[in-house]
Amino acid sequence: MLIYIENLYGPETKRVLEYMLKKHGEVTDEIISKETGLKINVVRRALYNLLEQGLLSYRRVRDRNSGWFIYYWSLNMDKLNTILLSRKRMLLDKLKKRLHFEENNEFYVCPLDGARYVFSEAMENDFRCPRCGEMLTYEDNADAIRFLRRKISEIEEELRREEQLLVG
């Protein structure tokens, strides 16, 4: 779960989520900033990223002295696992589609700018880069295919374990 958030939004959002997981209950962005050592604008961006994912909710209260709103953030623990499982399933689907694409195409790449073309695109351009005219070279994508297969296998195993925990 934390790795997914870090890959999606970066290490600061992961740190905020870790803090929220340990805190249990409501907390303000100022407290999170103070206790994590992250700048307030970084914390707020992380909180909105987590809110966008449905992992957090907030309650706002107007401060009687300043008139400003104070936001109290809390984790949606009941939705957390369901949301993450759903996101992992979406990621798994995208990886499977990418694997299918990699397995069913032959690729050529421009040695100068790294632009990648499928066989039909390369052939249409006489195996020359349409951007710079450089001769395209064949790309062996076996490493990419192995990587995708490994990631798919890892995510499928994670999903099996996590779904068993929810059911059992």
Image (cartoon, grey):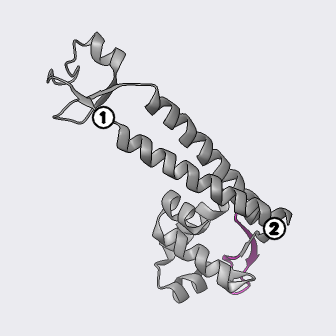
Number of marks in the image? 2
The dot on residue 140 is 1
The secondary structure making up most of the magenta span is strand
Residue drawn where x is 68% and y is 85% of the image: 23
In which quadrant of the rendered image does the N terminus lie?
bottom right
Q: Magenta stretch: residue 129 in it?
A: no
From this view, report whether residue 105 is shown above or below residue 86.
above
Residues 146 and 65: in front is 146
Is 163 placed above or below 72 here? above
- Can residue 66 be spotted in the picture? no
In the rendered view, would you say 161 is above or below 61?
A: above
Task: Give how far apart the Cα atoms at labels 1 and 2 are.
Answer: 45 Å
Question: Does 70 lie within the magenta span?
Answer: yes
Q: In which image quadrant can residue 131 be found?
A: top left
Amino acid at the residue labelled 1: Asp
Going 52% across and 57% down the picture, which residue do you hit?
8
| Residue at the image position 75 percent from the left and 82 percent from the top | 25
Question: What percent of the width, then of the height, locates residue 46?
Answer: 55, 67
Q: Which residues are magenta?
A: 55-73
Residue type indicated by callout 2: Asp
- In the image, taking residue 62 as reference, residue 1 lies left or right, namely left
Q: Which mark is residue 92?
A: none
Left or right: 136 in relation to 23: left
Question: Is residue 8 toward the left or the right of residue 78 in the image?
Answer: left
User: Element type at marker 1?
Assistant: loop
**Which numbered tag is attached to residue 78?**
2
Tag nearer the camera, 1 or 2: 1
